[in-house]
Amino acid sequence: MKTLFLTFVLLISYLVSNAQDFEVAPVVMNFDANPGQIQKKKMTIRNHANIKQTFTFNFGDYEINEEGKKVRMPAGKSKRSCASWITVSPTVLTLNPNEEREVTVLMTVPKNEFSTRWGMIYVQAAKEQEAREVDKQMATGIKVTPRIAVLVSQSPKSNTNYKGKIYGLKDVTTAKDTVKVFNVTVENTGDKIFEANVQLLLGDLATAKERKFTPKKHRVFPGEKRTFTLTLPNDLPKGKYGLAALLNYGHNTAIEGTQMMLEVK
């Protein structure tokens, strides 16, 4: 058993030491081409390995769940996909050790497509291995194919539909919590990606004094409902309070809010 474990550790060490080492910049690309236009950006690939490497470019989609996590899916499966609009040239890139080169990323927006779209470019390295190295990996059922995902978004300059709302403020504090915990939902009801700034405002009903607390920021995509978890200190003086959660997402929009009554006994 010890021999098998040692063999496994050595195998992992071998694969890690021989894994491809490369860098991609930028890893977020935001396009703002209007319908019918083609927009061009540059992406740099750097080979930090001591071997020659060949890189390929593939595409994928993702959607955002209520926890803000990206759920990846094949290209074309999301209704917000722009994968078919993206072209990378050259389609295959070979770099010597410590070499870097730029590739061109084109966003070709069809006519009458005014909506915000997004997707991913997967930059993948294929190490040029000797036959015996390939045999070793195939024999263990392990294939090392590292890749870096570049997030891509496309939203026309002419699209100014920023709109969001906040609702559902509720106390979710448990007996184990050392602070008061609240959840609130932010929904992007427009057609632009925005940065949501959500902050708690506490008003003492007896003294009319107000306190603002540290805000939280998250990117919210069109159609997304995002749960924000906010906290208050657990040492508030006894009394009755009005608690509001405020949403500010900029772009000359009004601040949105939702509120609840809070009694500290």
Image (cartoon, helix red, strand yellow):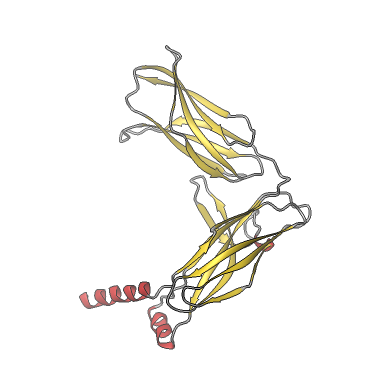
Q: Quadrant of the N terminus?
A: bottom left
- In the image, residue 129 sits, relative to residue 20, either above or below, namely below
Q: Left of 232 or right of it: where is 185? A: right
- In the image, residue 154 sits, relative to residue 92, either above or below, namely above
Residue 262: x and y in percent read: 42, 22
Front position in the image: 263 or 216 = 216
| Residue at 63% from the left image edge and 72% from the top image edge | 90
Q: Left of 112 or right of it: where is 130? A: left
Residue 129: x and y in percent read: 45, 83
Which residue, as the protein is rendered here, is positioned at the far bottom?
131
Residue 157: x and y in percent read: 71, 47
Q: Left of 13 or right of it: where is 218? A: right
Q: How many marks?
A: 0
- In the image, residue 69 sits, relative to residue 213, either above or below, namely below
Q: Quadrant of the C terminus?
A: top left
| Residue at 59% from the left image edge and 75% from the top image edge | 92
Which residue, as the protein is rendered here, is positioned at the far top?
206
| Residue at 57% from the left image edge and 75% from the top image edge | 93
Front position in the image: 74 or 245 = 245
| Residue at 66% from the left image edge and 58% from the top image edge | 82
Residue 44: x and y in percent read: 56, 65
Res. 29 image quadrant: bottom right
